[in-house]
Amino acid sequence: MSLRVLSESSAYFLIAHGSRDARSRQALEACTLLVRQELANHSDWANPWPQVGNGVLEFGDRPLSEQIHTFAEAADQDGIRKVYLLPLFLMMGNHVQEDLPEAVSKARSLMSSEVRQRVELVLCPALGTHPDIPQLLRERMAELPCDRWLLIAHGTRRSGGNEPIAALANHLGALPAYWSTEPSLETQLSAHLQTQLNPKAPDTLRVGILPYFLFTGKLIDAMGEAVSKLQIKFPTLQLEMMSPLNPSPLLAKLLLNLCL
């Protein structure tokens, strides 16, 4: 995968949802470092460490617009002329469609007229839109051979909001499940998987559960506890829950490949 953006006059600002869980902040910092390393590995710049920062939409010490503004002002002082804003969001919900554009617009208004003329803020597509996301998930699934797979996302009650997850799961040959709405993990296990067992076969059905989330946190902890309880309820199934995507060099490449 080639990188589209390799300019010494560019800077990069990763945007995550944010969390009170310290592990989420650590994962964001790790992802930021991987992006910086990926840029350095593919450049011949005099400065081997490109300017890369990060911010959060929620649970930050300041509004996201102010975080972006501060980064842009610092970038301007270093002669940067374009700041790429990289959203680490898998779903195209209100955060991506409304909150992020609003924060970027407000950040522009906070910049002085001189800086606005010199520095361009470019809001890139969200990570979840990258066409290689399914391949990334397939590679994760290949790490743990299973008879059946469940792809679990947070889910939404908004009309049509879960259709992209259902389509992605179907593309992967998996069943979709949602944490906050139906069909839940328990529903899918009961309705589709337990009934597929051959009562005469001694082996259990190995079911992989792949969380469609970026980072480990309290929600993933709660999901793990729920899977442990479901294992007791469905003793004929062998439930295997994987970790979320988490920072990786490939994830950094996907982010950079979304730069316009």
Image (cartoon, helix red, strand yellow):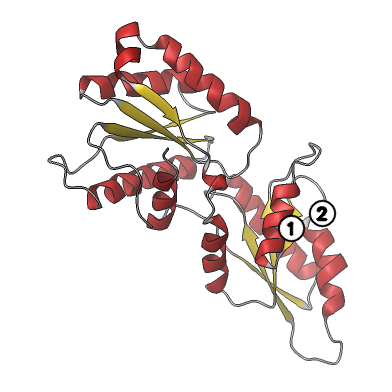
Q: Is residue 171 visible?
A: yes
Percent position of residue 190, x then y: 85, 66
Question: Which residue extends farthest top?
Answer: 113
Q: Is residue 189 above or below residue 27?
A: below
Q: Nearer the viewer, residue 151 or 116?
A: 116
Crowdedness of circle 1 by 10 Å Cα count: few (<14), some, many (20+)? many
Percent position of residue 78, x then y: 20, 24
Q: Which mark is residue 176?
A: 1
Q: Nearer the viewer, residue 42 or 183?
A: 42
Image mark count: 2
Q: Looking at the rendering, which quadrant does residue 76 occupy?
A: top left
State the residue at coordinates (34%, 46%): 35
Per the image, the residue denoted by label 2 is 183
Q: Is residue 226 above or below residue 78?
A: below
Q: Secondary structure at mark 2?
A: loop
Locate the C terminus and report the quarter of the image it occupies: top left
Q: Is residue 90 left or right of residue 195?
A: left
State the residue at coordinates (47%, 45%): 23
Task: Residue type at mark 2: give it.
Answer: Pro
Q: What is the distance, in whole Å, between disc 1 and disc 2 at their CAs?
A: 8 Å
Locate the N terminus and report the quarter of the image it occupies: bottom left
Q: Looking at the rendering, which quadrant does residue 45 occupy?
A: top left
Work out whether mark 1 precedes mark 2 in sequence or the reverse, and give the earlier one: 1
Q: Nearer the viewer, residue 177 or 102?
A: 102
Crowdedness of circle 2 by 10 Å Cα count: few (<14), some, many (20+)? some
Percent position of residue 33, x then y: 32, 45
Q: Are marks 1 and 2 in contact (CB under 8 Å)?
A: yes
Q: Is residue 244 visible?
A: no
Task: Residue type at mark 1: give it.
Answer: Pro
State the residue at coordinates (67%, 56%): 168
